[in-house]
Image (cartoon, rainbow, N blue to C red):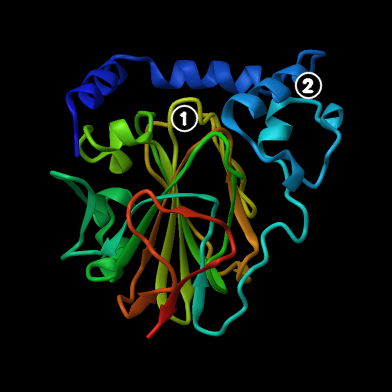
Amino acid sequence: MSTLKDYLKAYPFYWLPHHFISRIVYRLTRIESSWVEPAIRKFSSVFNVNLSEARVQDLSTFKTFNEFFTRELKADARPVDSTQNVLVCPVDGTISQARDITDGAIFQAKGHHYTTTALLGGDPSLSAPFKHGLFSTIYLSPRDYHRIHMPCDATLTHQVYIPGRLFSVAPFTVNTIPGLFARNERVAALFDTKYGRMAMVLVGAINVAAIETVWGGLVTPPARKTIQTKSYKTDTIHLKKGEEMGRFNMGSTIVWLMESADFTPCRPNEPGTPVKMGEAFMRKT
C-alpha cells in the first residue's frame, strides 16, 4: 500500500535527469583504479553481498566495479531444476507481483495497472498472445546476482528496444508512479516455447547504466529516441532452460510474460517473496 513517505521519496524522481546520472554511473563503474577493490568490499558490506558464491573469490582480480557487479557464480551455486514441464525462476530477486493478465492489463501495485501493449512498445501483434496469460514481476536489488537466465527452452523471435525514463524501480516508486514499467527504458525479448509465446522484459532504472543480451551484446546505452524492433525468425537462436540470456548493470526489474495461464506455482509467490535463479517457479497443468 502506498504511504505518504513513498510519495515523498518518489516525487523527486520526476525531476531528476535520469539518463545523465546513469551515464555518469556507467563511466565510473568502468574505471580501472586502485579504489576498485576497496569499493567492492564496502559495497559488499553495505548491501550484504554473499561473496562466497562468486566464481572468482580474489576481489583484486576485478579490474572494474562493473566486472564485479556482473560477476559469474560458482557452477553449483544455482542448480537448475530439470523437472519436465517446470519453468524455473530466471533471476535472483524478490517477487513484486505474480498474477494472471486480465484482458491485457498487468497489475503493478494498488491502484496502478499498465497494458501488455504498452510494455512491449505499442505493437498489438506482439502483445496479443499475452492478453489472458500470466506475468511475474521480479525486482533485483543491488545485492543480487545480475545475470538473467531462461525459464525454459525457447527460440528467440524478436528483440524490442523501447526508449523511456529511468525511474527507480524500488518498492516506493512501484507503489506510487503510474505505469512505471511501461515508462522506463527497457529491452523486450520474445520467444517461442512449447508452452506458447513468452516475453522477458528487462526494465532499466536509474543507475542501471547498461542492458545486455547474449545474442546482441550491449543494447543500451546509448539511449535512443525511437522504438527499435529486430526480428530473429531466420537466425535460429535457441536457448536452453537455465542458460544465460542477458544481464543488468546495477539493480533493476524483469517482467516475465507467458501466453498460457495454465500453470500452478511451485512455491509461494506473494509480493515480497525472495527467489533464486534456477529454482522451480511454476508447473504446466
Which circle's residue, 2 or 1, is located before the other in the chain?
2
Query: Left of 216 or right of it: where is 32?
Result: right
Question: Foreground residue, 4 or 98?
Answer: 4
Q: Amino acid at mark 1?
A: Ala
Where is residue 226, by image quadrant? top left
Residue 233 in sight from this viewpoint = no
Query: Left of 257 or right of it: where is 35?
Result: right
Residue 223: mark in rendering: 1
Tell me: residue 235, above or below residue 182: below
Classify mark 2: residues with Cα within 10 Å, few (<14), some (14-19) or many (20+). Answer: some
Classify mark 1: residues with Cα within 10 Å, few (<14), some (14-19) or many (20+). Answer: some
Residue picked out by circle 2:
37
Where is residue 130, by image quadrant? bottom left
Q: Amino acid at mark 2?
A: Glu
Tell me: residue 194, above or below residue 270: below
Residue 174 in sight from this viewpoint = yes
Q: Nearer the viewer, mark 2 or mark 1?
A: 2
Question: Foreground residue, 184 or 111?
Answer: 111
Give the distance between the C-alpha atoms of the residues marked 2 and 1, in whole angstroms: 30 Å
Pointers 2 and 1 in contact (CB under 8 A)?
A: no
Measuring from the top left, give residue 50's x and y in whole percent: 67, 40
Tell me: residue 167, above or below residue 187: above
Tell me: residue 153, above or below residue 46: below
Measuring from the top left, give residue 83's x and y in whole percent: 58, 82
**Which residue appears at 44% of the width and 21% of the height?**
19
**Which residue appears at 20% of the width and 37% of the height?**
178
Query: Left of 195 or right of it: where is 111?
Result: left
Quadrant housing the N terminus: top left
**Which residue appears at 54% of the width and 54% of the height?**
91
